[in-house]
């Protein structure tokens, strides 16, 4: 029942955030990923039965991505207030979502491998490699999308993606990697405590 409620909540957010997005083209491109991945998540849950916390993490992460798609990551109004409060020169919502990708999606990958009978240590390694690999491929696809669909001068197209930060791609990947390591450490600590209580 808990997971079904999360699916309903996800679809409600999707419907609301599909209404009058800031940039319909950006919204459509960002939602290709959601449309492709969400059915896969539901199928994987049937196969491996994610625990409720894992399913909640995935749902929250996708909803945060939908907000970025609706308002565009560069113009994420809700996060602009935080940026202004800290005195930042740019909107860091995209970095936050990359960080949360590593933090909130690491454990689902781990569970997929671990439930197939792969050792705990190797499952951790494979989950980490998947996070880093997908993070890299996302940046490559973002670049290809810019080349194919952006009809403005290259400087303007690049500014729209990097917000003028020449190291934006490397930072996005680094945040996901750092967060995945943090998720790994927290999962190991939580797992050790759970096993201690059971014994």
Image (cartoon, rainbow, N blue to C red):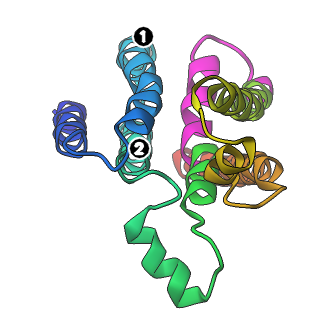
Residue stretch rendered in magenta on the structure? 103-122
The circle drawn on residue 69 is 2
Can you say whether 114 is above or below 92 in the image?
above
Of badges 2 and 1, the one in the foreground is 2
Write the residue at 19% across / 30% down.
4
Left or right of 193? Residue 173 is right
Left or right of 32? Residue 130 is right
Crowding around mark 1 (Cα neighbors within 10 Å: few <14, some 14 to 19, many 20+) is few
Q: Which residue is mark 1?
A: 47
Please, what is the dominant secondary structure of the magenta stretch? helix
Residue 193 is at least partly visible in this image: no
Task: Pick the residue in front: 120 or 12.
Answer: 12
Task: Pick the residue in front: 73 or 174.
Answer: 73
Write the residue at 73% across / 41% down.
154
Residue 74 is at least partly visible in this image: yes
Q: Earlier in the sequence, mark 2 or mark 1?
A: 1
């Amino acid at each position: 029942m808990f997971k079904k409620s999360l699916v309903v909540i996800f679809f409600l957010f999707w419907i609301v955030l599909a209404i009058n997005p800031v940039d319909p083209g950006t919204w459509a491109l960002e939602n290709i990923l959601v449309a492709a991945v969400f059915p896969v998540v539901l199928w994987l849950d049937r196969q491996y039965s994610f625990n409720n916390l894992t399913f909640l993490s995935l749902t929250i992460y996708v909803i945060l991505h939908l907000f970025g798609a609706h308002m565009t990551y560069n113009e994420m109004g809700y996060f602009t207030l935080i940026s202004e409060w800290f005195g930042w020169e740019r909107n860091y919502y995209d970095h936050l979502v990359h960080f949360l990708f590593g933090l909130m999606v690491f454990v689902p990958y781990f569970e997929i491998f671990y439930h197939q009978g792969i050792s705990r240590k190797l499952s951790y390694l494979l989950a980490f490699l998947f996070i880093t690999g997908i993070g890299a491929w996302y940046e490559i696809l973002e670049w290809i999308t810019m080349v194919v669909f952006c009809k403005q001068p290259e400087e303007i197209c690049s500014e729209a993606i990097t917000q003028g930060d020449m190291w934006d791609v490397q930072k996005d990947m680094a945040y996901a990697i750092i967060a995945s390591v943090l998720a790994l450490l927290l999962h190991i600590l939580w797992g050790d405590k759970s096993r201690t209580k059971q014994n």
